[in-house]
């Protein structure tokens, strides 16, 4: 990873090549898209907002040219708007404020706005959205020869489309934070070894954010249908992910203070996948309550 970070910072051409190269690799292995945005984030963190924007603009020109040539213009625009630009904004904010907690909160606010927009568009254009989902996914599932009737298969595909709307904003928040964290880690590897770990373990979003989250969740429980319900469902996904990050910061603190082996953290992340969504809710609750309980202050070294 250190070698990748050093290559990105070697010069403007290398930064552009990394940004475009990882984006192209993401066509075959989606997580590589995080590396693409992280390259822009790293340049912004180290060399400033202007250099980061310059890399973003030049890379965008190449991305649009490649997308146009391959007939995937929408994908190219998606990368620029939903991956590169948000990470550039967050990285320059982090460089100025030097507060990872503040920047993640800003990312969560962006996610909440996205949840509102997605819900409004879905409720307004539900028929068109369902048609797009059916046209693009139904043939693939039919080819898979699933043991479902046509009506069951159609309902299954439409449910996937609804999940995209419900959790799309939370997924976007996760991708923004993952790319920003990766960029910050790269910066730490080169200039401040261990610095990102310390920064991440201090994540705390405060009582005001926790109270706001609780009110939002309470309203979501009371509202059962309509546009407001759709907005709240997407917003709760963002809130849960936000406090999952704080809960993970607590877990990493325990591992360091108690000198636990790394395997315990690997097991935690594995269980998050296996026991989803139950463990996510548990970790989010721990992160939320930490704003009052301050668990990290109670952890005693071995």
Image (cartoon, rainbow, N blue to C red):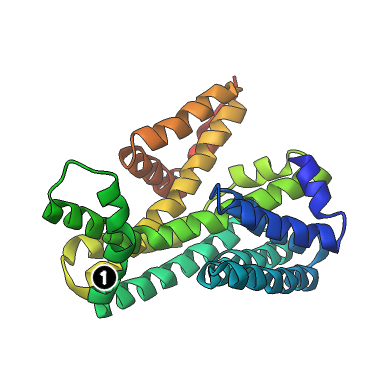
Compared to 262, does 219 lie above or below?
below
Residue 132: percent from left, percent from top: 31, 69
Residue 54 picture quarter? bottom right
Crowding at mark 1 (Cα within 10 Å: few <14, some 14-19, many 20+): few
Residue 103 picture quarter? bottom right
Kindly tell me whether residue 54 is visible in this rendering: yes
Compared to 283, does 113 lie above or below?
below
**Mark 1 sits on what residue?**
131
- Left/right of residue 71 with respect to residue 283 in the rendered view: right
Q: Residue at x 24, y 43 (%)?
A: 145
Compared to 146, does 161 lie above or below?
below
Residue 157: percent from left, percent from top: 25, 56
- Which residue reaches farthest right? 10
Residue 170 picture quarter? bottom left
Q: Quadrant of the C terminus?
A: top right
- Which residue reaches farthest bottom? 124
- Left/right of residue 164 with respect to residue 197 in the rendered view: left
Q: Residue at x 45, y 65 (%)?
A: 111
Q: Residue at x 57, y 51 (%)?
A: 178
Residue closest to the eye, 297 or 164: 164
- Left/right of residue 152 with respect to residue 183 in the rendered view: left
User: How many marks can you see?
Assistant: 1
Residue closest to the eye, 154 or 86: 154
Q: Quadrant of the N terminus?
A: top right
Residue 124: percent from left, percent from top: 26, 80
Residue closest to the eye, 191 or 251: 191
Residue 159: percent from left, percent from top: 23, 57
Kindly tell me whether residue 205 is visible in this rendering: no
Q: Residue at x 69, y 45 (%)?
A: 196
Q: Secondary structure at mark 1?
A: helix
């Amino acid at each position: 990873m250190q070698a990748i970070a050093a290559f990105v910072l070697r010069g403007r051409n290398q930064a552009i090549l990394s940004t475009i190269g990882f984006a192209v690799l993401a066509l075959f292995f989606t997580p590589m898209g995080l590396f693409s945005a992280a390259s822009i984030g790293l340049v912004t963190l180290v060399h400033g907002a202007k250099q980061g924007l310059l890399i973003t603009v030049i890379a965008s020109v190449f991305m649009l040219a490649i997308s146009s040539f391959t007939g995937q213009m929408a994908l190219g625009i998606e990368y620029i708007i939903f991956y590169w630009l948000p990470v550039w904004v967050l990285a320059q904010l982090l460089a100025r404020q030097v507060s990872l907690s503040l920047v993640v909160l800003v990312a969560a606010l962006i996610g909440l706005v996205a949840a509102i927009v997605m819900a409004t568009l879905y409720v307004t254009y539900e028929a068109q959205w369902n048609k797009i989902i059916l046209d693009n996914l139904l043939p693939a599932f039919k080819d898979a020869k699933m043991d479902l009737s046509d009506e069951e298969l159609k309902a299954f595909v439409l449910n996937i489309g609804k999940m995209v709307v419900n959790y799309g904003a939370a997924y976007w928040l996760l991708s923004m934070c993952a790319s920003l964290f990766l960029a910050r880690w790269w910066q730490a590897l080169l200039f401040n070894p261990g610095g990102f770990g310390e920064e991440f373990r201090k994540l705390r979003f405060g009582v005001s954010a926790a109270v706001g989250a609780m009110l939002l969740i309470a309203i979501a429980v009371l509202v059962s249908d309509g546009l407001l319900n759709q907005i709240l469902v997407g917003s709760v996904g963002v809130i849960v992910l936000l406090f999952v990050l704080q809960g993970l910061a607590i877990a990493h603190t325990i591992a360091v203070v108690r000198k636990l082996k790394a395997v315990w953290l690997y097991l935690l992340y594995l269980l998050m996948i296996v026991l989803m969504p139950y463990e996510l809710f548990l970790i989010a609750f721990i992160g939320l309550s930490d704003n009052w309980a301050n668990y990290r202050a109670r952890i005693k070294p071995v």
